[in-house]
Image (cartoon, grey):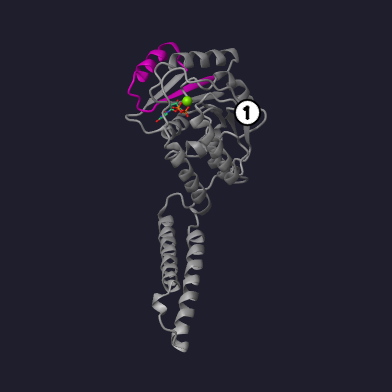
Amino acid sequence: MQISVVIPLFNEAESLPELVSWIDIVMKRNQFTYEMVLVDDGSTDDSWQVIRQLRQSYISIKAIRFKRNYGKSAALNEGFIAASGDVVITMDADLQDSPDEIPELYRMIVEDKYDLVSGWKKKRYDPISKTIPTKLYNAVTRRISGIKLHDFNCGLKAYDRKVVKSIEVIGEMHRYIPVMAKWAGFRRIGEKVVQHRERKYGVTKFGLGRFINGPLDLLSIIFVSRFSKKPMHFFGLFGSLFIFLGFVILFILSFQKLFFDVSGIASRPLFYFGILTFIVGTQFFTTGFLAEMALRQAPTRNQYLVDEKIGLDANMID
Ligand code: UDP
Ligand code: MG
């Protein structure tokens, strides 16, 4: 099968019929073999009934329904597990992304050999309260990750199947799939300007929370990708610096007290600062040791992504 279209959806009953028939038209016109993987993220409207109905006319539909709402990341992750196409395309269900982009995205993966192509909603049809913070968020993510994308969180993306089969989308990390892909070793990350349309039915499912949680997730992802297999390199560094600083301060103060009989040491701010840094330093170290011990128990402690092997049993990722 050439293409899997993975669509996470939460209360999108009105959009679904139009979306499904549009995708089907595009696929047939281009003679693609394909499937649509609809992941109903615990909708409380008629989405699931609509999907059941649509399935009668479109056998390319495969669908999963969550018992409750787990979030877009969870829905994408399940979709990725279920997908069996060579190229996996993700798309929002609200008709803001256009299925007409599919053929070119497919071509970029197959012919231009991109691992991942992200849509770029150059001209957006969203309220200004969303577009401005989004610009900032993209600039920060670009700086930190070193990936030259304008629109990290675009729902419309295309992947070589190897990418989706080797990364796991947890928490709300769907915003950072390109970052995870890069850190997993998939370096060919491209971008395509895509059409964006106004939401026709229903309402947005994400509020202002995204601008607080997004940056926190970025911090976690950087920390985890750099240090999860060597936590002591992080905690030990800060631990040493703090302990050293605290030690020097307390040593000098003790020296003054003992040999020069300086009085009032304990009422000087430096005294408290010395104690504080010393204690904080030991805490960093303790955390580092605990993290190292946790790592030894982690099933993923020696899990690496193998690209190719020679002269060994090939157990490649696809
Ligand atoms: N979505 C989902 N689970 C959720 C929230 C959203 O599957 O908990 C889906 C939603 O149905 C849509 C896509 O994720 O297909 C993007 O959501 P939305 O359009 O609300 O986000 P926005 O376009 O405002 O960023
Ligand atoms: Mg939307």
- Residue at 65% x, 32% y is 113
Where is residue 207 shown, x and y percent of the image? 42, 32
Quadrant where the N terminus is found in the figure:
top right
How crowded is the residue under tag 1: few (<14 C-alpha within 10 Å), some, or many (20+)?
many
| Residue at disc 1, CB closer than 8 Å to ligand 1 | no
Please name the amino acid that badge 1 sits on: Lys
Q: In this view, does 49 lie above or below 174?
A: above
Where is residue 163 shown, x and y percent of the image? 55, 36
Residue in front for this viewpoint, 223 or 88: 223
Residue 112 can be seen in this image: yes
Query: Which residue carries the number 1 mark?
Result: 192
Quadrant where the C terminus is found in the figure:
top right
- Residue at 44% x, 14% y is 17
Extreme top residue here? 57
Mark count:
1
Classify residue 86 as left or right of residue 42: right
Where is residue 277 shown, x and y percent of the image? 45, 68
Q: Point out the stretch of residues depicted in magenta.
A: 33-60
- Residue at 40% x, 33% y is 71
Q: Is mark 1 on a helix, strand or loop?
A: strand
Q: In this view, does 287 lie above or below 173?
A: below
Question: Is residue 58 one of those drawn in magenta?
Answer: yes
Extreme right residue here? 112
Q: Quadrant of residue 8?
A: top left
Residue 306 can be seen in this image: no
